């Protein structure tokens, strides 16, 4: 095996799966994240510390978008890319070291939310003098739907990984299990974990409420296959779910950031908000409807089979 192929194999071992990776991630963020992960591993830096560092850098990026200076905006773009490389590195480091934790997953989800909230606030202050209250209404509305887009994209990726790799490697959360874990936590000893878990339960319940046919499917699977999901079922679901993975990636980071950078270059940052409300929401609706149809068909097969 050549050094190049060994390196590629090493990087792939730190990925969730090639099914759920986007072109830009595979060829840009994951190789960079892998190098960061190697460095942080040698330095003894934990994945959660990397996540927090990524949040700080991402917030700094968002602040740069308040200014009308293109040079400062470009600095913000660089910082946002740097932040996302850390967002990649924390997961790769966790898989590399076996330090995957529920708290780490919660913090990782918060990273994007905090960074983009800063971006929305910065752009709103930037346009406040000309737009007034309307830019804040547009930003809040956009931020609300951004949250739904990112949440469902993450949920569908983990559903796909559940059928591809099994429960342990999918990170598919279930609210009733989270609630059980929450109840045994102690506020005195586990304050941070319990605090974030409280909100993560609500986040997961919202995902579940938007996927009734999948909830029915997972319940049928629990009843019919309590030990292990048959390979034929897993393979069949993966095949039908795979085409949707490109939409989950578009709704997560790269596509929206490309549009954000374009809007900043032409000094019309509100264009980014409009893109999220129209194109990305249409994509979200299509993805939800398509996924629910897939789950409904599998429910019918399991109930009649």
Image (spheres, rainbow, N blue to C red):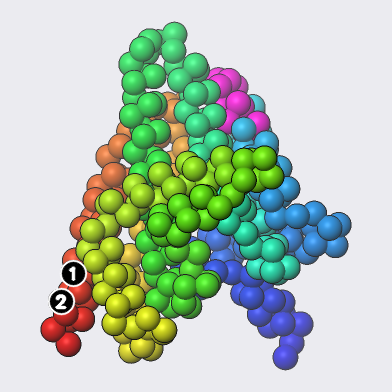
- Residue on which the image places disc 2: 300
Instruction: Report the disc number at residue 63.
Output: none
Q: Quadrant of the image for the C terminus?
A: bottom left
Q: Is residue 273 magenta?
A: no
Residue 72 position within the rendered picture, expressed as x and y whole percent measured from the top left: 64, 27
Q: State the residue in front, 231 or 219.
A: 219
In the image, which residues are magenta? 60-71
Residue sitting at x 53%, y 60%: 24
Work out whether 186 lies above or below 157. above
Residue 79 position within the rendered picture, expressed as x and y whole percent measured from the top left: 66, 39
Q: Quadrant of the image for the N terminus?
A: bottom right
Residue 2 position within the rendered picture, expressed as x and y whole percent measured from the top left: 74, 87
- Looking at the rendered structure, the secondary structure element under dot 1 is helix
Residue 5 occupies quadrant:
bottom right
Residue 160 position within the rendered picture, expressed as x and y whole percent measured from the top left: 39, 70
Work out whether 115 lies above or below 10. above
- Residue on which the image places disc 1: 296
Is there a contact, CB below 8 Å, between mark 2 and mark 1? yes
Work out whether 205 lies above or below 302. above
* Res. 88 visible in picture: no
Q: Is 161 displayed left or right of 219 in the figure?
A: right
Give the CA distance from mark 2 to mark 1: 6 Å
Task: Count residues near mark 2 (Cα–Cα under 10 Å), then give few for <14, some for 14-19, many for 20+.
Answer: few
* Res. 90 visible in picture: yes
């Amino acid at each position: 095996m050549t050094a190049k192929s060994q390196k590629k194999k090493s990087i792939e071992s730190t990925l969730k799966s090639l099914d759920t990776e986007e072109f830009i991630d595979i060829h840009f963020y994951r190789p960079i994240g892998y190098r960061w992960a190697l460095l942080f591993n040698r330095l003894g830096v934990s994945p959660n510390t990397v996540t927090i560092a990524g949040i700080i850098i991402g917030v700094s990026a968002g602040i740069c978008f308040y200014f009308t200076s293109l040079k400062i905006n470009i600095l913000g773009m660089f910082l946002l890319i740097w932040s996302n490389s850390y967002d990649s590195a924390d997961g790769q480091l966790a898989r590399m070291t076996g330090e995957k934790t529920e708290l780490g997953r919660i913090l990782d989800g918060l990273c994007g939310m905090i960074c983009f909230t800063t971006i929305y606030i910065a752009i709103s202050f930037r346009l406040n003098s000309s737009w007034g209250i309307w830019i804040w209404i547009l930003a809040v509305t956009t931020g609300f739907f951004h949250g739904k887009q990112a949440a469902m994209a993450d949920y569908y990726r983990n559903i796909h990984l559940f059928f591809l790799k099994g429960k342990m490697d999918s990170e598919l959360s279930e609210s009733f299990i989270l609630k059980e874990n929450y109840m045994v936590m102690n506020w005195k000893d586990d304050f941070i974990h319990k605090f974030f878990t409280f909100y993560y339960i609500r986040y997961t319940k919202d995902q579940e409420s938007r996927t009734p046919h999948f909830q029915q499917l997972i319940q049928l699977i629990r009843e019919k296959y309590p030990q292990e999901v048959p390979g034929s079922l897993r393979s069949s679901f993966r095949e039908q779910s795979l085409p949707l993975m490109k939409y989950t990636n578009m709704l997560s980071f790269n596509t929206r950031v490309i549009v954000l950078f374009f809007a900043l270059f032409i000094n019309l940052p509100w264009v980014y908000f409009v893109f999220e409300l129209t194109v990305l929401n249409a994509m979200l609706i299509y993805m939800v409807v398509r996924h629910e149809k897939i789950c409904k068909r599998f429910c019918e097969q399991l109930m009649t089979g």
